Image (cartoon, grey):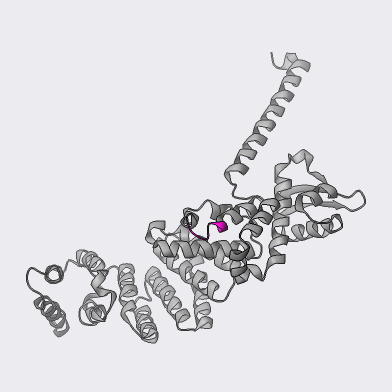
Amino acid sequence: MSTQTLAASDYIETMKQLYSTTDEMFQHYKEIADLYKRKLWHQLTQKLERFIVLPRFNHGRELIELYERFIRDFETRINQLKFVHMIRIISRQFQDINEAIKFQEEIALKVASHKEAHILIRSVLADNLLQAGRQNDCKALLDQLKVELEGITGIDSTVYEWFYKTSWHYYKSVVMPAEFYRSALTYLAYIPIESLSESEKVQLAFDLGLAALVGENIYNFGELLAHPILESLNNTDNHWMILLLHAFNSGNIDQYDALVSQHKSQLEAQVVLANNTQLLKRKIAILALMELVFSRPSEARQIPFSVISATTKIPIDQVEILVMKALCLKVVKGVIDEVEQFVHFTWVQPRVLSLDQTAHMRDKLKSWAATVQKMRNNMEDQTAELFS
């Protein structure tokens, strides 16, 4: 038996002797020592995964010592992805963020041959670089990881989880709402919502709402409105955010104006909203236009300027500018007839539909089916011999 192995075994025995035989920690170390002695690496990994998340390790450096004097001895023998997850938790015990970064950089070198583990530890590392104020280094590493992730498939969901978690942390820190919105929503797709604390859910839901409202090229809130995280804002002082998102998603300008009046102080308290009032007005006008086009059957999408003006609450002489903006954003397609003062719309951007919008789509399909049936009946009446 090597000196290092003896040292690892001795360390666990020493830790075990610090507690009485009736103490829970004694039993933990006893089981760890037994699994290590029998070289049951899989079972030992499972035991350590449960052990290192005990509440007693929220403070101190005991886990760092556990790694240095014990786990290091067999780190190459265990599942490398699980090993990195343990390292992620152990890293929290470093009081100095730069120590944690150095530690994770060393681990990254050790697992370089294992793609999943290598991407995971560097995603965690990028998050620590961000916490250390090294935004440029964080972004450079995220860009590198993005390329690597695009080149592989079938990897563990926790790898994506940490990449997108760090991504949304970064985009929030540099105030890039649209990028934050997309990264955070993707992150939520890889985690069980129950894994977040109530305060985390409330904060993330509110941040996502703000990002959706002011983010460039975000003209569909259906995915966010359908996500259970938004329910965390119910029965809170920020419930108005849900109502505001619904107003935007349906392009309901009257409801938006009423909410702005009703929750004036709350809205003004959010600097990002107070500084973007013109953007919000333009966005909801475009969403109202999209809803107008969506609500009409395809054969009735030649819409006069006057109707667009009434729907979007903008002067008729600004209708053409609004439509051109919508065309540039590629949320609608069509042709403007400046002489006859109408727009012939040929397409509207697909969206995740609300229940009301889904019901409207159902009614349109019913109408279409009835029209088809009527045409079929007419054909049968006129050419009965073909259907006999």
Instruction: Place residue 384 in its image quadrant.
Output: top right
Identified at 75% across, 61% down, the residue is: 328
In percent of the image, x 70 and y 48: which residue is there?
A: 291
Q: Horizontal and vertical percent for residue 360?
A: 64, 39
Name above or below for residue 128 compared with residue 213. Answer: below
Query: Residue farthest to the left?
Result: 21
- Quadrant showing the C terminus: top right
> Does residue 376 appear in this view?
yes
Q: Position of residue 79 (x, y in %)?
A: 29, 67
Quick one: 57 or 45, which is closer to the camera? Answer: 57
Location of residue 59 by image quarter:
bottom left
* Residue shown at 58% from the left, 74% from the top: 175
Dominant SS of magenta comes to loop
User: Which residues are the magenta region?
Assistant: 236-241
Give the residue drawn at x 31%, y 67%. Answer: 82
138 displayed left or right of 326: left
Q: Residue 179: percent from the left, percent from the top? A: 58, 67
Above or below 131: residue 212:
above
Report the quarter where the N terminus lies: bottom left
Residue 158 in which image quadrant: bottom left
109 relative position to 26: left or right: right
Give x and y (percent) for residue 229.
47, 56
> Can residue 221 be seen by looking at this rendering?
no
